[in-house]
Image (spheres, rainbow, N blue to C red):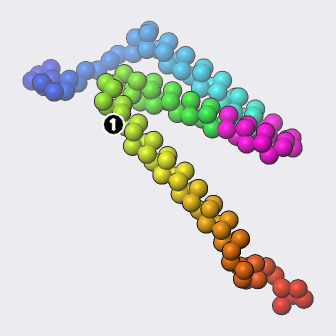
Amino acid sequence: MDQHTSSEVTFHHHVPGEENVKRIWKTFWVLLIITIIELGLGLFLYATDFPSWLNLAIKGVIVILSLAKAFYIVSIFMHLGDEIRNMIMTIVVPLMLFIWFIAAFLWDGNSYKNLRNTYDKHFEERTTEKKGGH
């Protein structure tokens, strides 16, 4: 076992070749361009007053661009793109469930807030300042 191999796992060290260096630089430029677009959209969103639907659409584009950056980082720099499909699914499926979990809690919390404000007649009395300063 001098070669650091076994029947299940092979350990080998890759010296960065010209192909890997080009791949890393390409990824760098893609991430840089996506980041510049995100920053531009964010500044544009901050500097102007859009209708709420357009505001939401721009924020959605920013989220999609952030997910694209996450994909590139995980795929290239963490080498997940080079793994077998089962290994990728072992990581991606729990991540998708976690994202669903967060979305479900946000949805549920918003629903609770709206129902509380609608049906709790005393909520407004407890949370607003009384007239006259007391």
Tell me the quarter of the picture where residue 62 sits: top right
Count the marks. Answer: 1
Label 1 neighbour load within 10 Å: few <14, some 14-19, many 20+:
few
Q: Main secondary structure of the magenta part?
A: helix
Mark 1: which amino acid? Thr
User: Can you give x and y, in whole percent of width and height, for residue 97 in the image?
Assistant: 43, 45
Q: Is residue 4 visible?
A: no
Q: Dot 1 corresponds to which residue?
A: 90
83, above or below 94, in the image: above
Q: Residue farthest to the front?
A: 119
133, above or below 123, in the image: below
Locate residue 5 relative to residue 44 in the image: left or right.
left
Magenta segment boundaries in residue numbering: 43-61
Residue nearest the viewer, comparing 100 with 17: 100
Locate residue 38 relative to residue 29 in the image: left or right.
right
Quadrant in which the N terminus appears? top left
User: Can you give x and y, in whole percent of width and height, for residue 61 in the image?
Assistant: 68, 34
Locate residue 11 relative to residue 80 in the image: left or right.
left
Tell me the quarter of the picture where residue 118 sits: bottom right
| Residue 53 falls inside the magenta stretch | yes
Q: Residue at x 36, y 33 (%)?
A: 89
| Residue 4 falls inside the magenta stretch | no
Q: Residue at x 25, y 21 (%)?
A: 12
Quadrant in which the C terminus appears? bottom right
40, above or below 29, in the image: below
For mark 1, give the secondary structure.
helix
User: Can you give x and y, in whole percent of width and height, for residue 81 in the image?
Assistant: 40, 24
User: Can you give x and y, in whole percent of width and height, for residue 22 in the image?
Assistant: 50, 12
Q: Is residue 57 visible?
A: yes
Residue nearest the viewer, comparing 105 with 62: 105
